[in-house]
Image (cartoon, rainbow, N blue to C red):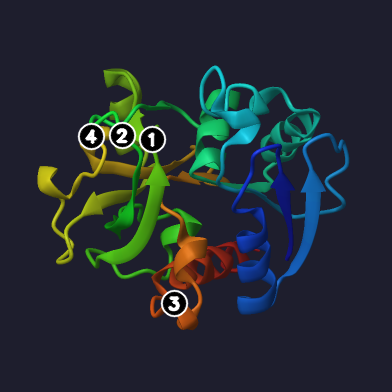
């Protein structure tokens, strides 16, 4: 599988993502620029974290109009795989590839710390190999990470098994105390109905190298790759 990692002006996790996909997971990786109109034959597109266009106006709102996003939308519409992490998740929501929006944290502060998430979807590839009800320790670093959707959208997300991760405590229990930003229903990540577009606020690429004494993020990437290959 060939991955393409996009760099927007203000991206700061693109090289971390390239390193993990290429050096840790042994995947073929292409770097893509936001002005590109060629996805270079990539099967899987990744929108990394950072502060695209300085987060001016609204996080992800300007990046959504980058030339490459036209190609990403076409790619996703054809069934191609896309992952957005943190700012990448915000861009996917702004572009309409994922439902809902990411609002200011309820604390109105930037939060950077380790949190725990637990897999939710029974069918999304990103959750395929993960242990249900287990807590995975993954870092967050955001100020606009509070997931929000209207009641109908929220009902559909749950009805269609589109919630991929919820914030939980270290024992895997989903509760208000484990919710770092006020996200509705403790939602940390969602996918689209076709299960080929995924977005999450926590940064799995920051927990994928054994040198960092945490490989929970690597397990998420491995689950995603294994889940996709199983469907081919």
What secondary structure is found at the residue carrying circle 2? loop
Quadrant of the image containing the C terminus:
bottom right
* Marks 1 and 4, how far apart at CA: 11 Å
Q: CA distance from mark 3 to mark 1?
A: 24 Å
Binning the other alpha carbons within 10 Å of mark 2 as few (below 14), some (14 to 19) or many (20 upward) gives few
Residue 153's place in the image compared with 15, above or below, is above
Residue 72 seen in the figure: yes
Residue occupying the point 61% across, 49% down: 12
Looking at the rendered structure, the secondary structure element under dot 3 is helix
Q: Which mark is residue 182?
A: 4
In space, the residues marked 4 and 2 are separated at their CA atoms by 12 Å
CB atoms of marks 1 and 2 within 8 Å: yes
Q: Nearer the viewer, mark 3 or mark 2?
A: 2
The numbered mark, 1 or 2, whose residue comes first in the sequence reads 2
Q: Which mark is residue 109?
A: 2
Q: Gap in Å between the C-alphas at discs 1 and 2?
A: 6 Å
């Amino acid at each position: 599988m060939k991955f393409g990692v996009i760099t927007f002006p203000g991206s700061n996790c693109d090289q971390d993502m390239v390193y993990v996909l290429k050096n840790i997971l042994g995947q073929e990786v292409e770097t893509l620029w936001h002005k590109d109109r060629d996805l270079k034959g990539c099967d899987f597109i990744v929108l990394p974290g950072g502060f695209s266009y300085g987060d001016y106006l609204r996080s992800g709102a300007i990046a959504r109009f980058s030339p490459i996003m036209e190609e990403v939308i076409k790619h996703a519409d054809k069934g191609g795989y896309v992952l957005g992490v943190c700012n990448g998740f915000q861009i996917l929501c702004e572009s309409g590839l994922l439902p809902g929006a990411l609002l200011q944290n309820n604390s109105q502060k930037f939060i950077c710390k380790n949190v725990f998430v637990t897999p939710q979807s029974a069918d999304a590839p990103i959750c395929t190999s993960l242990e249900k009800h287990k807590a995975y320790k993954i870092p967050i670093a955001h100020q606009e990470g509070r997931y929000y959707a209207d009641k109908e959208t929220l009902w559909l997300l749950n009805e269609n098994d589109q919630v991929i991760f919820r914030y939980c405590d270290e024992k895997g229990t989903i509760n208000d105390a484990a919710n770092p930003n006020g996200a509705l229903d403790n939602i940390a990540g969602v996918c689209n109905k076709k299960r080929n577009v995924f977005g999450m606020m926590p940064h799995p690429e920051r927990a994928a190298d054994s040198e960092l004494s945490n490989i929970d993020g690597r397990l998420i990437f491995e689950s995603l790759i294994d889940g996709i290959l199983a469907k081919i």
